[in-house]
Image: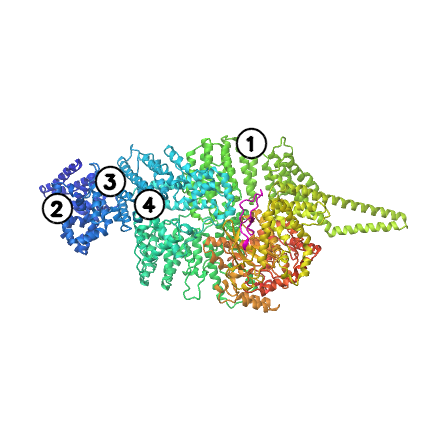
Amino acid sequence: MKTPQHAQFDVVCAKLRESLDDLVTFKGARRLDQRSARVETLLNCLSCIAVATPVCEKRAILALCQVISKYDIDPDVVKKVLGQVALELRYPSTTLYVQEHLSFLVDQWLSDDFKLMDFPFQLLECDSKKDFYRDNYRTLVPYLVMHDGLAEVKVLAAEIGLDYIGLLHECLPRVVVHVLPLFAVESAIQEGQKREKFKQDIAVYQKFEEEVTTPVLNQLLTERIDEVVVNLLLLLDPEGSSAAPALNQPSFNAYIIRATMQYLTKCCKSTSSLVTLLTSRQNNIQRVLLALSSRLSQCYTSNERGRALLIYRLFVKLLMQELGSGLGGSWAFVVRSAIHTICHEIRKLRLSGGSGGAAGRTSADGEMFDICCDVLECVFSAALQSCAEELARHLSAITAVLVDVVKQNTAQSQKARSLLELLVVQNTDKLAGAIALLDPFPDGSAFSQLEATHSAIKYADGALTLREELELFLKTRAKCRLEGLVHVAEQLTAKRRELARLVLQCEEQQSQSVVVKLLCALLGLCRSNVEEARECRSCEAIEERSSACRSETTAERLEHVGAVRQAVAKCLGCIGVADLSILVLQSQRIPDSVELPGNLGNLEGFSSTEFQRNTAIFQCLNTYLTDPEVRVISAASTILQELLATASGQKFAATYKELTDDHLFNHLYPFRCKKKAPRAEVVKPDEDTFLSFVNAEVVWTPNSSHTDWIIGLVCNLIKSTAVTDELLCRLVPICKAKPKFCELVFPFLIHDILLLENVTFKAVISQQVRNFFAGAYGVVSSSRSTTPALLDCTGGAHEPVYKNKRSVRVLLDTIQYLRMQRRPAAGRPHSTEWDNNFWLDVDYLHLARAAHFCSAFFMSILFTEIWCDVRATEEAASEAHKQKSSQDFLLSQLDHVSTSSSSAEDDQDCTVPSLLLESYRAVGDPDGVYGCVVGRLTNPAIRVNMYEFEGKWEQTLGMHDLLKAQDPSRSAVGIVGALQHAGLEHLLSNYLERNGTGSCAALLEAQYASAWKSLGRWTLEEAPPSRDMGFNQVLYGSLLALREGEEKGVRLLLAAGRSSAVDELVHNGLEATKSVYPTLAKLQCLGELESAVGVVCSGARVCELLERWRQSDKFCLAEFDYVEPVLALRSCVLSILAEKGKNREEVRTFTIDCLERISSLARESGHLQVAEKSMFRIKELENIWHTNMLSWRLEEADVYWARKEPETALCFLKSLVQDLKSVPNVSSSTAALYAKALCLYGDWLATTHFKHPCVIMEEYLEKAVECVDINRLHGHPVAVDAYMMLARYADNQYQHIVDYTKSSTYEAKQALVRDNQQSADMIRLMDKNQSISNRTLIILEKQTVLDQREDAEMLKQKERFLVKSIDNYIKVLRAGDEHDLSIFRLISLWFCNSENASVNALISKGLEAVPSYKFLLLMYQLAARMSTKQQRCRLFQPTLDGFIRRTVLDHPHHTLPIILALANSNKDTELFKPAAKGRKSTASKSVVQEEDRVLAAKNMLSSLKSRGQSELIGSMEELSDAFIRLAYSDASSFKKVTTPINIPKDQPLLKLRNLHSVAMPTLELEMDKSSKYENIVHIVRFEPTFKLAGGLNLPKILTCIGSDGQKRRQLVKARDDLRQDAVMEQVFGIVNKLLARQAETKKRRMHIRQYKVMPLSQRSGLLEWCEGTMPLGAYLIGDDHKSGAHHKYRPDDWTAVMCRTLMTKSDSGQKYANFLKACSNFQPVFRHFFLEAFPDPALWYERRLAYTRSMATNSIVGYILGLGDRHVQNILIDCNTAEVVHIDLGIAFEQGKILPTPETVPFRLTSDLIDGMGVTGTEGVFRRCCEKTMEVMRSSLETILTILEVLLYDPLYAWNLTPLKAYCVQRKRDDVPADASSGDLLDITDKASSFASCSSEGDVNKMAERVLLRLRQKLQGVEDGVPLSIAGQVGHLIQEARDPKNLSLLYPGWQPYI
């Protein structure tokens, strides 16, 4: 029955045909005119019908086609008309439009008795009927068959050259679906017309069956069941309203379709369901779903899409009915595919509330949404029953889509919410884990129940900490919604205190810190956001040219991208310039789209094995199966099918499942091949084919977009026949669909080609890569400037790709990937890691510049150094005949090579040093810069760069002024920048007003910055918000809008600023922390300004804003350049708040505090002009506000003190003190300020010596302490400072008196007094000349009285200063932990005055209140002074014992081993008396010497046992005895065994198990101030085997298993006194504390690596095994002294043995020359260690920097301590951190100088160690870090001397080196076998030990005094009797350490040539 529309259409068509038929009535020209007009009318009418009436659209198109044939109308005219129709209906092209309706057209064409050959093929862009047939035969043949046109099919087959039967076979699925429904419902077809048609169709089908044959038909039906099902489903008739468009015929309702499916199973002789039938082949269901999804994507009208969704729903419901059966293994794939397909469809819909708008479109979309919801509900219900875990994996994606629908508040929102509630509310038990990971739901009543359920699950165990919230976000960041980012920003804002704590943990946790991880995640989102925005803008550009795309989708996507960008920027702003304490932020990793599972997820860089490479590929392909674009899904499906059919693919699948528990292959099940893969086809590379595809500039450097370039290049490489890997050569389809995938596989392809080792292939690729980077180098050179503009990294569409940063980065990453692959030897004797750099013949300097261009600064530095190495090797080869001179030792590699790659390059900015300089600055290395400028400061450009780096803005300004005078055309950016940084804002403003900014963005930015910071210059031009606005322009406009109360304007500007900042972040690079800090500072400014908007415009509370700012300051990086903009902005905001009268008092107070902080930071960073400017601003405000605040005046005094104006500073400070003194009603803050001012005033007076010491102490320092005590400020920081300052000052005065009494002046004076007394006595004996004698006698007596009175007064002052210092040191220790090291000075004063009763009384009383943990640092020294003898002062020993006992009781695990070792001093002799045969007498003497101290220790243990420590002490005694017994067990028979050796069964160590009270001895137990040591890691057991470490005494390596399950190795040694090693490690720990307290050394993380040393007795001990380390000698020369890195990298050089033999045989006159000869033939190679172990550029740089800093710290500290015997086996290198570890510390305090062959260098700094520092050698990082270490050591002179004084005067140890021991130390390196690596001391005879033990206390004291004197000289910079500056002293030491003359005199076993 025809609808009214069809009836009307028939009428119209009849009229139109009639009008054309009537043309016969016209003749001539009139007939032509009429024909033209009537044809035009017909075309217009039919086209209007097609556009306006979907019901008649198909018939209108058919009519257009028929009129072409019937009325001979030009097809091109009709094609144009159809083109307009297609454009109106939003089809991409006319061809697609006609093809969409081709089935209907052909069916009706044939039904109307038209011939197929007459069909207007021109409408489909076909040039001939043959083309038409060939392109569309799959559509044509089924209709020809069903219209009884098999003869025409034969003609068609012949026309296109296909086999007739084969053509029928191919089209069979489309043919049978015309008839199968008829068979299925045959009984329902009644008599009449339908029955007649049924008979006709059956007859036609039987003819077809005869042609195909029934067996073949049945076979094909079974084999191609998936195609049959798809074609059957596509015939679905939705049976909608009469207004529905006409359908292609035949079409059937859902009932018939289902019946046909049941019938189909019978046809295939199956008794099960159709779904089960489909599972007979694992990819059938996947193919059906893909075909239906493809149909969905090809629908361009709402009606067709709705019908396609109904078809999809029908099939999915069939699948869900049998989901519980597993769907043949495809269950996971089906669930995921259905969910993501429907979610993508929902995103495309435009929903409306039903009122207004595009009603037709939105109503249709609403109906489609209902269908989508129906599908989802069906999937959810089935999945919840059978695979809830799989559904949980997709919950986040589902929620993201449905939440967006609910937020739109449309008619469909309720249905979306119902689905969410089904998952979240009604199935919490099954999905609880996934629900907890969801982002918060939006605010609003629609989400109230959802959010309540989500919160109840997420916070079931209580509120989460900020760490837990962030960790939760990090788990789901790849799937997070906008609400998740908003929630993170809210958490970061609300929990500032927690954030501050987390930031402080960054110092310890480094890259594992949750804050660092969060920052990296957010930066990754920034990168992906910028890329997505770029894609959206590209789509917008396409839409401008064509309206065929869905512009609404693109616009909404762009809006969403913008919202995400804003949220990410807000999160970053909340973090701000937090002190992350790391250098490297993100190293190169696998692309974001690849998520490696489980144990593969921590891989750095691209995968370095075939398995890891394939993992990346398969993970990507798996991700693409859920891509929004069906063409991508189709390509991925095709590729996966092919890959898993190969042997390599199947092997990978098996390995992957074995190694991981990941669910990857659950989703890839449909693509797995059950059959064993055939043998891989061997692809034969063809050079001609390769050259035709690859060797062309248009392939490598075209003028095209990055996308076109990478797709073309990758596809050409694969097609070139050079890619032979059976997986890689099949990737073309997905590469064409996904440019990102091309970027992933490009390095793999290049590597695979190069593995062929084909010379032509390598040469071509090398040449093309060189050409590419040569072009990129030209771009870099032309764009280099001091302040580069922000360049668009996308590249232009018509520019060479080498100008595109993304393209350049792809090739750079490829080079880096190749570097990480093992290169075949290719004819060389062997391949090394160094050879991996040369897979391609490229210029690494060009690569370095390109890397710098891409902001890959670590890569730039690495590539530059590789280039330098290559250049140095070339130069060395050209000068091979020259012997190394002494001058060569002082030159770095950078000095040896040329400064540019071509002599024609005259641009100094392009030199290697300049490139390194810029890269070092970019990564934030504060020291590397200096290594690039040594000897190059004559270059003005480098000099200006250095001035800017050092913050010397006055010099910078002067240089720019000179350069501007020379070249007036030079940019003024430099001058303006110098004025800005120097704080000369007024001059800057005038300069810019006078000279203008022109078109220079940098000058414009400076002008806006000057304006907003000036607080009053609001006259500059405003601009509308845009992404192109500069940061300061945004701030200026925002502040101006804020002043005027325009909230909307402020927020628009802030949004523009954030968007620009995100672009800037990505542009500047995300690898180095330094590169992101400036932008983070900007984002923090924008965030703080936004928080102020609520206060100014919305009435929010000011106090909350100020408190948030205070909390931010606690974790802010204390670098002026980053913090100053934030503080300056706050100052402006506060001024606006003050103007508006907001909380006036608090705002004014905070304003002054803010300015004061600016001044403080500026002063500390050397910006004194800025500091003074802040002070003037405070004065201005104070004159207006009269706040009577005084704290800023202290800062003012500090500023002038920093300006070297002490008189002015003292004047300001004195005025402040007087004003504070007169303040009535003193508050605690005022009292604290008063105390602080008094302390500072006293300190400055002492420094300037303006007043007498007693006056200083009495009038200022004591008053400060008195102020603290009176006002009870003991918990205030000023209390500790006041106590400490008074203690130190009194201590200094006491020490001056002590030094004076030891001086020659005092001795001379005392001699004079004695002479006077003798003279007086003689006069009394003389009787002559009485009067004269009396006068002389009186004079002498008066002089004597005066001298005695002066001495008495001096002694009185000495006693007073002593008591005062001790008293205040005690107060310091009681008040806080800041100065805990003062315990050393306190104990030193006590021990030096142990006979002083008042001192002992003070100590006894005062130290009782000092926490016992503060004595832990001194336990070795306190225990050494235990005695059973009565001391002169009876109070001393009881007091000492009491302190020790209290400390041991509170901290037994730290102290008992020390007491026990002392008590067991002679345990070796006691346990092994037979072994001591022949040495009885000497041993007994030693026992007598130590009996008193040992007895005291044993008494102490007995006392402790009676106080509840019996069990612990007993267990520790058993453990100690067991260790000693094992240490002495004979293992000489196993000397050459390298495998584990069984511990003898009689050893008691094996019996020790579960020692719950004994802490792991070699694990550093963290000190607990509360003394509650719970859950310590205790000893569970020891493994029953050990290994030998090598060495003469054969120390044994044990493995101890702790209660935490970890295995820890320990080294037990016998016949070696480890007490000195233990004390040296103690000193290292104290030095580390000093380094950590200084800002410069702390930020460089400079420290000395320590290891635990636990003496067990006088001659045995236990050491922590340094895991992951190896001796330098083992790496460099091998254990056999013949292999190692030297042999590996320089096989033609001499061996170490040859060099040592030469030096050993050299006499004194030949040593120098032979040493130079040895060095010339033994070149350094240690740089290769870092290239081997750390191939990733960022990691390489970080580790090498750590090594260099470690070398510097150890060198200087080792020099100060006189550490000797630093041969290559006594220095370890950590293979993970690259830090050096010094072991075997027995030669210290310059004992090496008294060895038989004296040591002549201050520390080891040989050529190999320098080689590891990079091309700058000892310059830059090493020298600067040495200077920083020396600065700390020299500034801590008194502290270090005090500490070492306590240690050196320790009576337990003899610091002198006996001749026998000295002899053995050097002899051991000759006698020890080649496998010795531990550097053990020889078994020094008891004679030597006895010699040391018998040294008198006086000898020890003299030795200690001598050592301390030399230490003092070193710390004062005195070298060879000449005082030097820090730089001078460090330079002298480096020169001495490197001097070949000094090195040649060393003992040959020291091996100075290594």
Q: To which quarter of the image does residue 483 belong? A: top left
- Pick the residue in front: 719 or 788: 719
Per the image, the residue denoted by label 3 is 303
Q: Secondary structure at mark 3?
A: helix
Mark 3 belongs to which amino acid?
Asn
- Residue numbers of the magenta segment: 1550-1578
Bin the neighbour count of mark 3 within 10 Å (Cα to Cα): few under 14, some 14-19, many 20 and up: some
Between disc 4 and disc 2, whose residue precedes?
A: 2
Residue at the far front in the pictured view: 1546
User: Comparing marks 3 and 4, which lies closer to the viewer?
Assistant: 4
Residue 200 — which label? 2
Q: Nearer the viewer, mark 3 or mark 2?
A: 2
Q: CA distance from mark 3 to mark 2?
A: 31 Å
Q: Which quarter of the image is occupied by the N terminus?
A: top left
Which mark is first along the chain, 1 or 4? 4
Task: Name the outermost residue toward the right.
Answer: 1328
Which residue corresponds to mark 1?
A: 1185
Going from the N terminus, do you reach mark 3 or mark 2 first?
A: 2
Name the N-terminal-most of marks 1 and 3. 3
Of helix, strand and loop, which one carries label 2?
Answer: helix
Residue 186 lies in what quarter of the image?
Answer: top left
> How far apart, in angstroms, are the residues tagged by discs 3 and 4?
26 Å
Residue 409 colored in magenta in the image: no
Q: Tell me the quarter of the image containing the C terminus.
A: bottom right
Q: CA distance from mark 1 to mark 3?
A: 73 Å
Residue 1465 at x, y percent in the picture: 64, 55
